[in-house]
Image: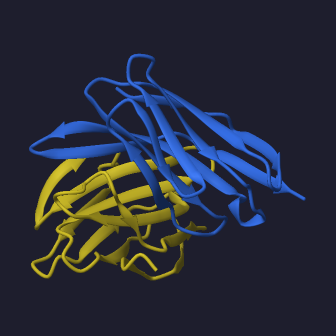
Amino acid sequence: DSGVTQTPKHLITATGQRVTLRCSPRSGDLSVYWYQQSLDQGLQFLIQYYNGEERAKGNILERFSAQQFPDLHSELNLSSLELGDSALYFCASSSESSQETQYFGPGTRLLVL
Amino acid sequence: GQSLEQPSEVTAVEGAIVQINCTYQTSGFYGLSWYQQHDGGAPTFLSYNALDGLEETGRFSSFLSRSDSYGYLLLQELQMKDSASYFCAVRGYSGAGSYQLTFGKGTKLSVIP
């Protein structure tokens, strides 16, 4: 158990819909990262938040957005969903002093029909 | 940009030694990480090399040559439970005091009796 929690575990929705994925980092970690993992693309970095502020952006679509709240939990919002958005979405957290070590949550499996 | 190359699949016998190679091209290299992911599970951190040389952690060792933009993960005394996907990831600077991990597509290791 990494100490990172993610909900829900599974999500099935239709094209055009909007969903919200939630993540709580390990106790004490201020950084939260979101990744998308699909069969053909591997693990793709989407976005990083540090103590409530956006810190780095990766391959995140404009239809996707995220935020980190004062209690440090984070939410990833996916809108206007397309079939190709079906993937595993992972959240990870790290401490400021050991950013190279990221602890991953169990992931949310999203299926868009 | 950053790109990483690692073999897509490797098969090895229980009790043997296997080496998984990773070559990378990147601007602003800070280190090479290795993560393990079992089917249906989350990536878990294995090791990190910021400097040239070998780092050993139990049955696993990781090597880095910055001049060759090359690293490898060495797994000794293979066990059936080592069957998993192994990802190398380059740690690069993404600005504002933040570092971003770019993952390779992963090597699926199958350990056979």
Chain drawn yellow, letter? Answer: A
Q: Nearer the viewer, residue A81 or A87?
A: A87
Q: Position of residue A59 (x, y in %)?
A: 35, 43
Please report the residue visible at 30 percent of the width from the left and 66 percent of the height from the top: A93
Q: Nearer the viewer, residue B112 or B4?
A: B112
Picture residue at 9% right of the left edge, 43% below the top:
B96
- The coloring applied to the image is by chain
Asked whether residue A23 appears in the rendered view, the answer is: yes
Image x and y of residue B16, in percent: 79, 48
Total of numbered circles in the picture? Answer: 0
A86 or A8, which lies in front?
A8
Where B95 sits versus A107, above or below?
A: above
Q: Quadrant of residue A75?
A: bottom left
Q: Residue at x 74, y 41 (%)?
A: B9
Q: Nearer the viewer, residue B101 or A58?
A: B101
Q: Position of residue B78 (x, y in %)?
A: 74, 55
Q: Would you say B86 lies left or right of B25 here?
A: right
Left or right: A97 as drawn, with respect to B21:
left
Decide if residue A58 is in sight here. Answer: no
Instruction: Tell me the quarter of the picture where residue A73 sits.
Output: bottom left
Q: Work out which quarter of the rendered image holds the N terminus of chain B and state it.
A: top left
Residue A32 versus residue B96 in the image, above or below:
below
| Extreme residue in the right direction | B113
Chain B, which colour? blue
